[in-house]
Amino acid sequence: MSSNILEKLNMEKVKLVENPVVLQNLSVMRDKNTDSQGVRMAIRNITRILMYEVSKMLPLVEKEVETPITKFNAKIIDPSKKIIISPILRAGLIFTDSAIDILPQACIRHIGMYRDEKTLKPVWYYNKIPMVAENPENTYVIITDPMLATGNSMKETIKLYSQKNIPMNNIKAVCILSAPEGLYHIQKDFPDIEIFTTAIDKGLNEHGYIIPGMGDAGDRIFNT
Ligand code: URA
């Protein structure tokens, strides 16, 4: 089933971020013998690389800088743009520290959703996102969740931001492991969204877990 789904994906919108450092950390993160501290460190290492990739969407402006030698026009991320990092609780929290280190000007807007174990549908329990985005054209949103399984929580979060008139080009989904099913579900409703991921796994098992995946990301990260 997943191989059929793979054929339907628009891979131009799926940014597969792969390099030896990512692959090494993925193997540590996936290994059932890695303890929570090891899982957290591996995820933070991968997060940094994903954040550098996704930061390519941010507009630049020139700023005059004086080096010890001379003045010149350097480039900086446009300070007039609003950057929102939106971790989907609870596993998405692991992105926050590395993400805010890299983009210290960003604000963090948490998304509280859990997965109903029977229906696998997301259930909201925390949403303090302002009703209206003040300047939607100048707002950039990075939604983080290590696991893109069914894609339901990610889809709900994309919907939330797109309803605030933030352009689809300014919204990015960032995940570590993705199932083809999740990618497909998102692309069906939001064909223009770019999804950054470090692996596309085989598929989902009957409980909605990614195969081979890493098990329950929240449990592995938070030692529960
Ligand atoms: N959430 C997880 O934590 N793991 C999966 O494999 C799928 C969803």
Image (cartoon, helix red, strand yellow):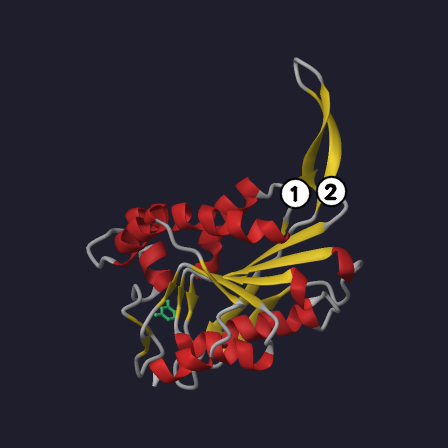
Q: Residue furthest left?
A: 33
Quadrant showing the N terminus: bottom left
Q: Position of residue 78 (x, y in %)?
A: 72, 43
Q: Position of residue 172 (x, y in %)?
A: 58, 62
Residue behind label 2 places its C-beta within 8 angstroms of ligand 1: no
Q: Nearer the viewer, residue 211 or 129?
A: 211
Q: Residue furthest right?
A: 134
Residue behind label 1 places its C-beta within 8 angstroms of ligand 1: no
Q: Secondary structure at mark 1?
A: loop
Task: Give the residue type at disc 2.
Answer: Pro
Q: Position of residue 27 (x, y in %)?
A: 27, 55
Any mark on residue 105, and which?
1
- Choose top left, top right, bottom left or bottom right for residue 190: bottom right
Residue 106 visible in the current orientation: yes
Q: Nearer the viewer, residue 95 or 197?
A: 197
Q: Secondary structure at mark 2?
A: loop
Any mark on residue 79, and which?
2
Task: Give the residue type at disc 1.
Answer: Gln
Regarding ligand 1, which quadrant of the image does it lie in?
bottom left
Q: Residue at 67% of width from left, 61% of height from top?
A: 170
C-alpha separation, residue under disc 2 versus residue under disc 1? 8 Å
Q: Position of residue 132 (x, y in %)?
A: 77, 66
**Is residue 209 positioned above or below 26 on the image?**
below
Q: Is residue 127 left or right of residue 123?
A: right
Sequence-wise first label, 2 or 1:
2
Q: Residue at 40% of width from left, 59% of height from top?
A: 198
Is mark 2 in CB contact (under 8 Å) with mark 1? yes
